[in-house]
Amino acid sequence: MQTHPVVRSALLAAGLLIPLAPAAAQQNPGFFVPPSAAPPAGAPRPAAPRPAPRPAAPNVQTLAPPPSQGPIVGGPPQDDAPPLQVQLPPVPDLPPMPRGTAPPAAVIGVLGIPDIMRASSAAQQVEKIIGERREKLNTDAQKEQAAWRDLQQALANQRAGLSADQIRTKERELQERITNAQRVFRDRNRIIQEAGQVGLAQIERMLIAVIRQVAESRGMNLVLHRAQVALNINEFDVTEQVVEQMNKVLASVTLPPEGVSAAVAAAPPPGTPPPPAPGATPAAANPATAPQPGPATPRR
């Protein structure tokens, strides 16, 4: 079935159809360079000339030439530009620094972040929920794409009995539906990505605190990623302790509801007063803003 131009352009914009470009290759034979003539057998080869020694230039910096744009199509190859030499000013004298306090002796620990994320209950929850929402989005997109094809086929069957104005009207309606569906799918995909970022931000915040807690409990003051260490012993590895503590303090995270943006979910409900600024005095406790008693009424 041939795809309608309106539907084909929409599918290309939505990333639901892979364009098939015609194989049209342009041949450019270029220039033929004859090989250099080889010397006869047994002839002595000329000695390569030795380059003359160059005097050393102080404070001369050799800069790489800018990248050339390449040879012109059909023209002879262009030689690269020579390196640029720039005379730099002398290095200034550094002022002396006072002697500082030496750091304590390093007590090192290592951990594997990928192993922690795979074993984290909260990370598994985020992966499951986000995966389900993405699968639902893909299913809805495929259904909408099938509906576009059905409308295209119906329009092709009715084309013979419709006028030019009617055909343009139906094509415009189909294009509007495709445009609106694309916008809806982009918004849904953005909302799903925001939800995943919200969940990972909660996990990352708690993971930093747990790593610091485990390191302090073991007397460690330096924790490295396991992938950055070539060799270590098991006593240095605190991955299992971090995973155990993470699952205790953060078994799950709070994600925005499906279809709700993270910014909307985090906004306070209407009518909620804004939180007071740090260091501000509450209105009830501030004597300048507290309601003052009125004049006393004399008793009769």
Image (tube, grey):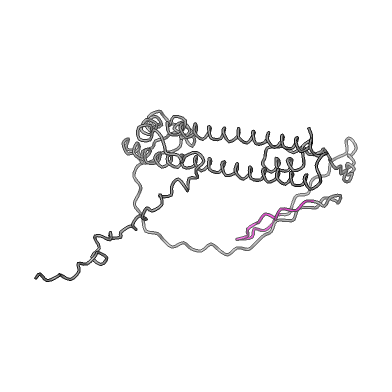
Relative to residue 60, is residue 67 drawn left or right?
Answer: right
Range covered by the magenta-colored residues: 53-70
Q: Nearer the viewer, residue 216 or 266?
A: 266
Q: Magenta segment, principal secondary structure?
A: loop
What residue is shown at x 70% (from left), y 45% (from top)? 173
Give how far across and how far down residue 168 sits, in percent: 77, 47
Give how far across and how far down residue 10 sits, in percent: 70, 43
Relative to residue 103, is residue 298 drawn left or right?
Answer: left
Instruction: List the single residue furthest toward the left.
Output: 300
Query: Residue 137 appears in which quarter of the rendering?
Result: top right
In this rendering, is residue 233 above or below 57? above
Instruction: List the single residue furthest toward the front.
Output: 300
Query: Residue 15 appears in which quarter of the rendering?
Result: top right
Q: Is residue 63 magenta?
A: yes
Query: Residue 45 appears in which quarter of the rendering?
Result: top right
Give how far across and how far down residue 296 sits, in percent: 15, 70
Q: How many marks?
A: 0
Q: Nearer the viewer, residue 98 or 234?
A: 234
**Quadrant where the N terminus lies?**
top right
Relative to residue 149, is residue 220 drawn left or right?
Answer: left
What residue is shown at x 67% (from left), y 54% (from top)? 64
**Quadrant where the C terminus lies?**
bottom left
Q: Is residue 21 magenta?
A: no
Q: Nearer the viewer, residue 106 or 179?
A: 179
What residue is shown at x 51% (from left), y 64% (from top)? 92
Instruction: List the single residue furthest toward the top.
Output: 234
